[in-house]
Amino acid sequence: MNPELLRQLPSVDQLLETPAAADLISSYGRPATVQALREVLDASRQAIRADRAAPISPAELLGAAEEALQVMVASTLRPAINATGVIIHTNLGRAPLSQLALQAIAGAAADYSTLEYDLGLGRRGSRSVHAQRLLTQITGAEAATVVNNNAAAVLLTLAALTRGREVIISRGQLVEIGGGFRIPDVMARSGAALVEIGTTNRTHLRDYEEAISEETAAILVAHHSNFRIVGFTAEAALNDLGLLARERGILLLHDLGSGALLDTAAYGLAHEPTVSESLAAGADVTCFSGDKLLGGPQAGIIVGRRDLIAQIGQHPLARAVRPDKLCLAGLSATLLHYVKDEATREVPVWRMISTLPGDLKRTARRWSRRLGRAGLSARVVPGESTVGGGSLPGATLPTWLVAIQHPQPDSLTARLRAAETPVIGRIEDDQLLLDPRTVLPEQERALLSTVLSAATQNGAEEQR
Ligand SMILES: *Cc1c(COP(=O)(O)O)cnc(C)c1O
């Protein structure tokens, strides 16, 4: 160790008197600046004691402090470009919202609102009225309520309607949805007693019939979500379960997962059961997510019989899982697109699902020409997009991809992730694949410039 170096280090107070420190204080505030300088000085002292190189001059120390302050204020929740072709990508924030939904959220955020204020009566109102009117109109349900997410909707529904009694569920539906959310665990937390019937691949109507007892409160049907059972399989039809539940005086509860309000089959996909179909088949209560196929903000939506929805709303847990005003504003605006029959135009998730392959090919060609002119090896190739979000497992939509050859695909994707607006694509056969289907039109320029600068950073030098 060289003690002379330690003596050369300035004090925090000396550094604070410099003009550069004054700039830092005006950008980041005094407490954070002082803390950053202390940490930088500590790090230098330790490095000197260990005979390692360290910033010593005031300019170097202030530079290191500025870097630390930049990291401190950098947002970890940032906009990203989803070029994966997975439309409802849970890790990338699920559904991007419509313009109208964004405006509604900004309005509710900036101003006071009638969140719980009844303008007609001039006194306290209910926050559940806002989405209820639209939801009942769209789905034909008697009543509706909104909670924080669909996991909360399942938990609350079971807690309010089946606590202390038995709930029958097929073994084929005891799934883990992702992020550790397991249907059986949630059921157990609700206080309901789980009665598993059938086998993983086959459950028949008679399995349900035989399991119903005095203790039975409900049959729960849960969407398989991201999981598909193929081969020798059987499941009881929802219609039959609706009739059975009615006949035996128990409830039929349906966790629909995605909650399609439009028919996916109209877009070349498999048919995903819709909310109206679930109710028409006899479900007493149906719940689904707000940010999957519905294309709105994170929410859990519960629709069904008026008396049951009222019972759910009065349960103490309802307060713990209630939605905030931004969610309700964004959800109502999104639902309005369905009421006005303009969802495929206005709701980004549905716009992406309904984009025609020819349009995707045109976009892919434009990108590949632009990248090609800059010297990248980019081709347009056919591929497949997926819906994601636990809906339609295994179903794909034909698309056109831009395939980029690069000597080091892994370092290319790392640079794309490190960009100001990160670009997330996929790697297949050592090529970077970009799917135009999930890239919002206003992100196209950022996407191309990010890909160009990431691919030419040192990749181009290596190619030469
Ligand atoms: C996604 C999903 C859930 C959880 O919904 P969140 O809104 O993510 O809480 C519950 N059940 C099923 C069947 C799902 O697909």
Image (cartoon, rainbow, N blue to C red):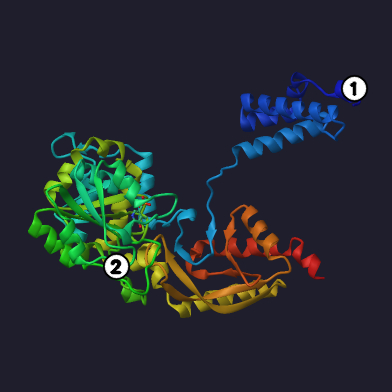
Q: Nearer the viewer, residue 124 or 298?
A: 298
Q: Is mark 1 within 8 Å of ligand 1?
A: no
Q: Which residue is mark 1?
A: 3
Residue visible at 39% across and 72% down in the picture: 354
- Name the amino acid type tagged 1: Pro
Query: Mark 1 and mark 2: span between their CA atoms?
Result: 77 Å
Mark yes or no: residue 140 visible. no
Image height check: is 269 above or below 13?
Answer: below
From the viewer's perspective, tell me whether residue 327 is left or right of residue 67: left
Image height check: is 422 above or below 312?
Answer: below
Q: Nearer the viewer, residue 36 or 299?
A: 299
From the viewer's perspective, tell me whether residue 116 is left or right of residue 57: left
Residue visible at 51% across and 62% down in the picture: 442
Q: Position of residue 334 (x, y in %)?
A: 32, 56
Which of the two marks, 1 or 2, is nearer to us in this view? 2
Image height check: is 82 above or below 325?
Answer: below
Circle 2 — which element? Answer: loop
Task: Give the quadrant of residue 129.
Answer: top left
Q: Which residue is mark 2?
A: 202
